[in-house]
Image (spheres, helix red, strand yellow):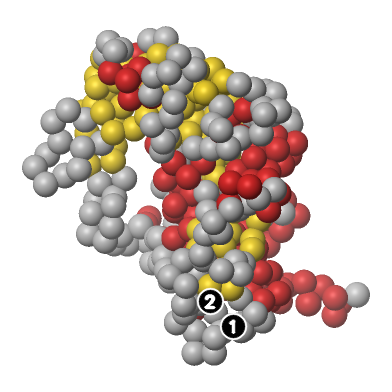
Amino acid sequence: MAADRRVLAIQDTTEISFGRNRRQPAELGPGTDDHSPALFAHPVLAVDRDDAAVLGPVYGEIWTRETTKVAADRAARERGEKESRRWLTAMQATHARLDRARQVIMVADREADIYTPFAECPTGMDLVVRAHHDRKLANGQKLSDAAASWTDLGYAEVHVAPRGPGDKGRWARVAVRAGTVDLARPATSPEAQAAHVRLTMVEVREPDPPKGKKALHWRLLTTLPAGDLEQAREVACIYRQRWRIEQLFRSMKRDGLGLEDSQLVRKDHLVKITAIALIAASRTMQLVDARDGSSRPASDVLDADLLPIAEAIGRRLEGRTARQQNPHPKHSLAWLAWIIARLGGWHGYYKPPGPKTMRDGWDVFAAKLQGYAEALDDLK
């Protein structure tokens, strides 16, 4: 599905806590609160840059921690023993798996602001990472010093994602500036790495935030060019797509699959169900995205051989009114999303179907497919 596409490979880490489980999974390590047993998952979600469509997970790592306490000799530990190595490992695996893509841009938040991924980024892969550290540059300056001397390229409107329950997000008018920086190798990095790495930095800042709102301020480190306002805005727009992986995590948990409410207690079972949840939540996102129309094929989420069965199921779901008819082109992803939503209890009226409706609908759909397969076996 990634062939000849511009693909955003968005990576991040989420904690899956099972503290609410009545039977505590004894084999799991602690979560960040050092009490509740938890798993940690680090997926890479592929998103089409041109239409923001979710293509699916391309890599994932799932693990547990022995302790949440940071070792005093962390800097002296071997690279393979550090959790931070996952950022580079994910980049390398993604680069290999998306080798047919026209362009691959790795997108990550501040936790990925580590020198090693910058220094060892696979050839042909681009990066957009939000800076966390006010890093030292090769000329002795800091990142903040360099940005302060640049002239604004212009202004842009940026959507700020919701920050919690009840927050619908907002639009912010931001000033945009950009320039080239040479990151100096930290003292803790291996000497085998380059002494400095040249990157572009795009700074996006909100000079006049609304009363009571925190001002938007991003420093984005990237391998992409940003010589003018249009290019700098493109970098900011790419970074904005990072919220898609937050949607993935919500679809795995409270807004969809309810993974953290699982009654499983064995570690190997929980690891497997977490891997399955990553795939299922990605599929749910694809269906929700397509609910209002999509030119993408239904085969993005369903084997083409099963489309005739979906047709038969869909015909039985259509009603007499126009709003109870499937309005989308046959075998499109939107057409399939309408069928799944109807199976999930949506009647075609009121608000559009969300992740939970799509999840419930897919469960019913999968059961019908299983019944069809068993009926075929009986006829053989």
Q: Whole-Å distance between the Cαs marked 1 and 2?
A: 7 Å
Q: Position of residue 165 (x, y in %)?
A: 26, 61
* Circle number at residue 67: none
Residue 101 vs 17, above or below: the answer is: above
- In the image, what residue occupies the spot 48% across and 77% down? 36
Label 1 or label 2, whichever comes before in sequence order: 1
Relative to 206, 35 lies left or right: right
Please state which of residues 131 and 4 is positioned toward the viewer in this rendering: 131
Classify the position of the N terminus by image quarter: top right
Relative to 166, 54 lies left or right: right
Please state which of residues 247 and 301 is positioned toward the viewer in this rendering: 247
Q: Name the outermost residue toward the right.
A: 380
Neighbor class of circle 2 (other Cα within 10 Å; few <14, some 14-19, many 20+) is many
Q: Position of residue 333 (x, y in %)?
A: 56, 48
Q: Secondary structure at mark 2?
A: strand
Q: Position of residue 54 (x, y in %)?
A: 54, 44
Q: Amino acid at mark 1?
A: Pro
Neighbor class of circle 1 (other Cα within 10 Å; few <14, some 14-19, many 20+) is some
State which quadrant residue 180 falls in.
top left
- In the image, what residue occupies the spot 75% across and 55% down? 305
Q: Secondary structure at mark 1?
A: loop
Question: Which residue in the protein does label 1 denote?
Answer: 25
Q: Amino acid at mark 2?
A: Pro
Classify the position of the C terminus by image quarter: bottom right
Please state which of residues 284 and 180 is positioned toward the viewer in this rendering: 180
Relative to 360, 372 lies left or right: right
Q: Is residue 53 visible?
A: no
Q: Is residue 80 visible?
A: yes
Question: Which residue in the protein does label 2 denote?
Answer: 37
Marks 1 and 2 in Cβ contact (< 8 Å)? yes
- In the image, what residue occupies the spot 57% across and 21% down? 197
